[in-house]
Image (tube, grey):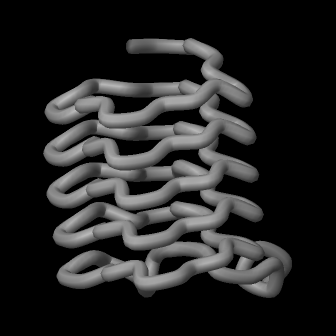
Amino acid sequence: MRLCFFDFACFSECSFEKSDMTFLSFAGANIKNSSFRGSEIQNVNYGGCSIFNVVFDNSNLYNSRFIEADLRDTSIINCNLKQVYFIKTRRTNVIIRASNTAEAIHDMEQIQG
């Protein structure tokens, strides 16, 4: 998928596994009980999303944005997080493991510096 807009949409029980997504926007969407496992998710906007019980394991999230998103019961294991924005992201029971978290952006000082 390329250049698609799903802003403020609701997704439940969806499988986006092994998807190739570039330049998509899920801004303000509600995504729950879904999986993006093994996907290419580059330059995707999840800004302001409510993300509950979602799996991103083994995915490339390069340059995606979770700015002001609410992540709960979410798994991000073995993912490329280079230039992924987690600014003002609320996290509850989020597992981030075996991923390059040092290359993610967690606050504005990283951008301005």
Q: Residue at x 76, y 75 (%)?
A: 88
- x%, y% of residue 75? 29, 69
**Residue 82 position (above or below residue 43):** below
**Residue 107 position (above or below residue 24):** below
Residue toward you, 110 or 53: 53
Among the 4 quarters of the image, the one containing residue 34: top left
- x%, y% of residue 1? 38, 13
Q: Is residue 46 left or right of residue 11?
A: right
Total marks placed: 0
Q: Residue at x 27, y 56 (%)?
A: 55
Q: Is residue 85 left or right of residue 110?
A: left
**Residue 80 position (above or below residue 16):** below
- x%, y% of residue 72? 49, 70
Q: Residue at x 28, y 37 (%)?
A: 40
Among the 4 quarters of the image, the one containing residue 38: top left
Residue toward you, 45 or 43: 45
Among the 4 quarters of the image, the one containing residue 66: bottom right
Report the quarter where the C terminus lies.
bottom right
Q: Residue at x 46, y 13 (%)?
A: 2
**Residue 26 position (above or below residue 88):** above
- x%, y% of residue 18? 15, 32
Residue toward you, 73 or 108: 73
Q: Is residue 85 left or right of residue 101?
A: right
Q: Is residue 66 left or right of residue 13?
A: right
Residue toward you, 10 or 26: 10
